[in-house]
Amino acid sequence: MTFDENYTKLPKVYKRAGKECYLDPIRNKLIYVTPEETVRQRVIQYLLEIGYPNNMIDVEEHLSHYGVDSRRRADIVINAYTNNSDVFVQLMVIECKAPNVELDNRACNQVFDYADLLGANFVVVTNGYSFLCYHYNSSHNIYERITHFPSYSDLLSNSYHIMNFGKMPPRIQFDKLEEGVQGYPNEIGENTPKNLQICMVNFVECLLDSEYRLPIKKYKLFKIIDDLGVRYTSYGDASGGVFTGLYRSFLVEHKNSTEIVSIGLSAYCTWAKQDILKTSINVAVDNEKSSHHAIQLVIDDNCSFSSNTIHFYHHGRIAIGNIGSGKLDELREFVKKSYPEIISGNKYYLGSLTNDRLWRLDDEEVVKLIENLISYALIRDEYRDYKKSQNKR
């Protein structure tokens, strides 16, 4: 959804000490112009135009102002007094992102946390032009997309309409997979060999198929607590790149720690060869420290295709933030200790898929591949933590 063009005006700009400032109509002070502040001011103007009372709008307020033990700030909070009472309650939290920021799950998670702490039922995430609106479903403890930006009276009456996304389109038939390659330009590299492209159409649709779920059980190295389904989100890699798209996410318990591990595909290139687009399977980990790709398995360089079967390997090379590259023999010792069955010569064998059917998340071959990918990703992150701790000494 996007803001009405009639409501995208900004307050007058003044200069203070040679720097441009907005005169904020809520805080009644001059605020330096930045991309994020421009978004905040655009949203404030919109709220005032559609009838939000300015004395019920807080901007960049510390959560501690609302009795929350936190030093964090919320961009915009909409308040109200309860009926026949002087009790001040929070109705909506708005998170303002820079104009170039993708409105994905990661952008939403922070403001969901703020809304939980404040007890607000409505959430908006915006980059000043597009916006996503949510309402909290207390029965299922989730935030659900709603159809429109709520008016102030909607907030007071708790009125909303849940967005109906409709049914996912049916999967491409097995004998039509080659025709489906063009439908995934962001997931499948145009320079990936055709036989591998076809397999990757099968695999990406397997991940996106919500009708089938990865078995919820204890695996050798971890336990699947829940299959979280498909999320639109972003992850970074060691080179500073950002990959945004659809990922299948799983809630995983590993060594008494709960993490979200997500798997998705992306077209991939290197800085040296930006005109060569390959295909990468990305395994990402969300934890309290970071959200990042633990593995980027480039299909073109690591997989082989023989006898109608695709075999997934990984070379083992690993980047560790600012430290640089890890040592192959050290990583190998970590794998040998925890999950030696994937060691294959000087590579890691992650599984095989027979290309004779549409793959499903509960297929035995697919389950084993996913188990190996997640296990390998968790071990690689353990090794990264080890190297980072060494580097601090």
Image (cartoon, grey):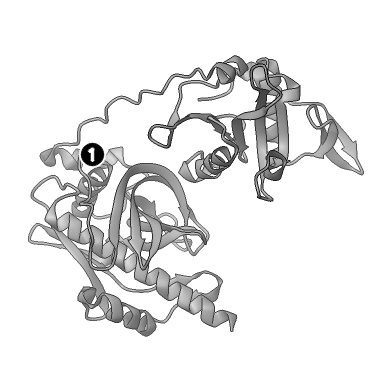
| Identity of the residue drawn at 50% across and 56% down | 241
Image quadrant of residue 378? bottom left
Note whether 368 is above or below 44 in the view shown: below
| Identity of the residue drawn at 84% across and 30% down | 28
Query: What kind of element bears circle 1?
Result: helix
Residue lying at the far right in this picture: please name it. 17
Density class for disc 1 (Cα within 10 Å; few <14, some 14-19, many ≥20) is: some
Q: Is residue 243 in view from this perspective?
A: no
**In front of the other: 362 or 58:** 58
Q: Which residue position holds label 1?
A: 180
Q: Is residue 272 in view from this perspective?
A: yes
Q: Whole-percent x and y of residue 323?
A: 54, 75
Type of the residue with mark 1: Gly
Q: Whole-percent x and y of residue 385?
A: 47, 73
| Identity of the residue drawn at 28% across and 60% down | 223
> Which of the image's four quarters has the C terminus?
bottom right
Q: Whole-percent x and y of residue 124?
A: 56, 31
**In front of the other: 275 or 115:** 115
Note whether 314 is above or below 242 in the view shown: below
